[in-house]
Image (cartoon, rainbow, N blue to C red):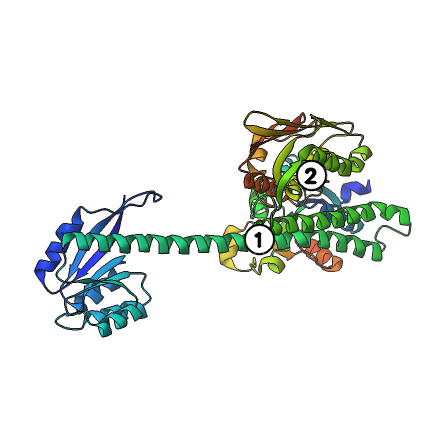
Amino acid sequence: MSALKLLIVDDEPGIRSGAERVLRDFSVGYPFMDEDFTFEIYEAETGEKAIEMIDSTPFDIILLDNKLPGIDGIEVLEYIKNKEYDISVMMITSYASLELAIKATNNGAFNFVPKPFTPQELKTSVENITKNLFLRRMTRKMKEEGKQIRFQFLSVLSHELKSPINAVEGYLKMMKDKQIGNNLDDYMEMVERSIERIKGMRNLILDLLDLTRMESGKKNRDLRTIDIIEIAKTVVDSVEPLAIQRNIKLKIESDDTLFMTADKNEVEIILNNLISNAVKYNKEDGEVFVSLRKTASNIDIVIKDTGIGMSEDEIGLLFQDFVRIKNNKTKFITGSGLGLSIAKKMVELYKGTIMVESTPDVGSKFIIKIPV
Amino acid sequence: METNNKKKIFLVDDDVDYILQMTKILENLGFEVVSACGQKEGEEMISKIKPDLAILDLMMENKDSGFILSHRIKNIHPNVPVIIASAMTSETGMIFSLEDESDRGWIKADLYLEKGLRTDQLHREINKLLKL
């Protein structure tokens, strides 16, 4: 239960106490709100007093009479607007004129309640103003969080893009200065590492494209009935050269065909990111098993490897943007840190889930379940 | 015999290529290098070695990995000079200098260097800290 601070500004004591009585035990709820709002009620009999109170207390809502002994309600409203206080104001007035209504609205009044009002009229108005306030604050919060996330993403991204450039530049400088002598063969490790880092950077850019495409172009998805076994085979073929270099065997276990309604590119990205990881984080002479099956309610895709595995802590970090598991076993493996986060987001587009089971030095198993 | 006279530098960074490059550079300058990849490995090694100087990256597993490691090193080897080397200023625009008393109070390092320093400058700074 969260209490909103509500100030009643009226020179008639009857109106103040009446409103206080009506709102004292009143609460406003929304089905999707975590908690109901109640009201903590304050009173002011003049505009001057109201301004004094506004400056010292962060009010959420003000019920404001226009006709006051000293300064008018409209002047109080102007004051709130100039100070840019986040307060929703409702005017209460018996002498409503179009001119006043326009002036008040221009100064940010939320609505009008004519005097005299019934308890029900007051409750309805306060309910509306509360819901509006809640939605307005919620929207602002979400916008700020969105900005924050975007900024973090960009700063990490710039770091991820710069480190391969720094690495390659460092090697080139060492070669230029002939730091380890005149024998070209001695520089081969540097050349190999430079190529590896450039490859990593290219993959990062490709992953970024997948990510932006997914986040910006959700409308352009091309959903149709496709055979995911066929896609899995294509992916395995494309990963094969990498596997052969390290004598890793790739096996698909499935029926001949398995149809689902999906976007071909998305399924390809999901399978590619997981199967290429299963090869990258495997050991020499290891194995990768890909199994695709339809059960009564799901399509189950399992990608199992005999690789380096992960600890519980590492699994917890796995699906976040730019997170790469850094340890002695992974330090020479390049990756963007985006592959699994992309795969997870894409699986979620199909209301599916990805689970991980892993044992260090034994291997990892990724289980995707997509509801049919 | 000669290796016994060589000063030992403990190098910690999460970029394996930076380690390879710095190791070559420091070895060419006549130092012995012991390296660790990342904060975790660095922490594991601290108690096992007795370096003459440490060069630590700032942002590794954590944003303040270098500071944490520096603190741990100073606890075990209070007299070992520590250099924090980072690309942080060029990436974030954040600056801190260890000349400032308020920074010195909480950053347990002797020198902060921006990565990409010229070899001769680096050499000079190391020598200064080693009092060579």
Check the image and report above or below for A362 versus A213: above
CB under 8 Å between callouts 2 and 1?
A: no
- Residue A260 placed where, x, y %? 62, 35
Task: Name the residue type under label 1.
Answer: Ser
The chain containing the residue under callout 2 comes to: A
Left or right? Give the position of A274 relative to A350.
right
Residue A99 appears in which quarter of the rendering? bottom left
Task: Name the residue type under label 2.
Answer: Asn
User: Between residues A46 and A347, which one lies in front from this camera angle?
Assistant: A347
- Residue B73 placed where, x, y %? 59, 42
* Total numbered labels: 2
- Residue A13 placed where, x, y %? 9, 60
User: Between residues B128 and B89, which one lies in front from this camera angle?
Assistant: B89
Residue assigned mark 1: A216
Mark 2 residue element: helix
Query: Which of the two labelled residues, at mark 2 and mark 1, occupies the earlier sequence position?
Result: 1
Q: Which mark is residue A272?
A: 2
Mark 1 residue element: helix
Label 2: few (<14), some or many (≥20) within 10 Å? Answer: many
Q: Which image quadrant: the N terminus of chain B?
A: top right
Distance between mark 2 and mark 1 Cα atoms: 21 Å
